[in-house]
Amino acid sequence: MRYYLIDEISRADIDKINDFLNHSAMRSELEKLFWIKIPRDLLSEVQYQHVQCGPHVFAVELGNDWIKIEFFIRNLMDLQCTCQDYCTSQQKDFLMNFAQKMIEDLGIKT
């Protein structure tokens, strides 16, 4: 799996990130895994056509001192569908900007 990893994060900052994601992301069934929706205008052609599969999301996982953001765009309806794929360059920019803005807005030290 390809992903963006930010590590060496303090416990207090992990708690800030967890609180932020609890309020701004979709929770998964796993405690430290969150889903962030990709805006419709950034979906690939196949994803855009697969409205019934939406929402299309990327995963954000929290560890004890790290956060991992996956570069794989999935849907939450059909895990075998062809609309799931590694992110496009625009989607990659979106998730990298999401991570950077979150770090800046929360005052996370890395």
Image: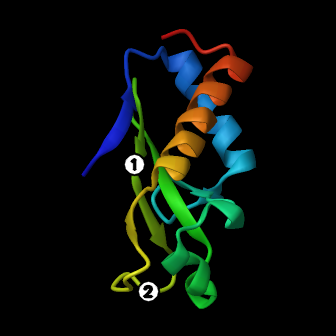
Q: Quadrant of residue 69?
A: top left
Q: Choose between 45 and 80: the one closer to the eye.
A: 45
**Mark 1 vs mark 2: which is more N-terminal?**
1
Q: Nearer the viewer, residue 99 or 34?
A: 99
Q: How many marks?
A: 2
Quick one: label 1, few (<14), some, or many (20+) residues within 10 Å? many
Q: Residue at x 48, y 11 (%)?
A: 110
Q: Position of residue 98 (x, y in %)?
A: 62, 37
In the orientation shown, which residue stands out farthest toward the bottom? 52
Instruction: List the residue tagged with mark 1.
Output: 70
Q: Where 13 falls versus 88 (above or below)?
A: above
Alpha carbon distance from label 1 to label 2: 18 Å
Q: Which residue is mark 2?
A: 78
Whether residue 41 is visible: yes
- Residue at screen point 38% across, 15% down: 8
Q: Is residue 12 left or right of residue 72?
A: right
Q: Secondary structure at mark 2?
A: loop
Q: Position of residue 13 (x, y in %)?
A: 57, 19
| Residue 36: image location, x then y, percent | 60, 55
Q: Is residue 24 above or below residue 99?
A: below
- As shown in the figure, which amino acid type bears the numbered disc 2? Asp
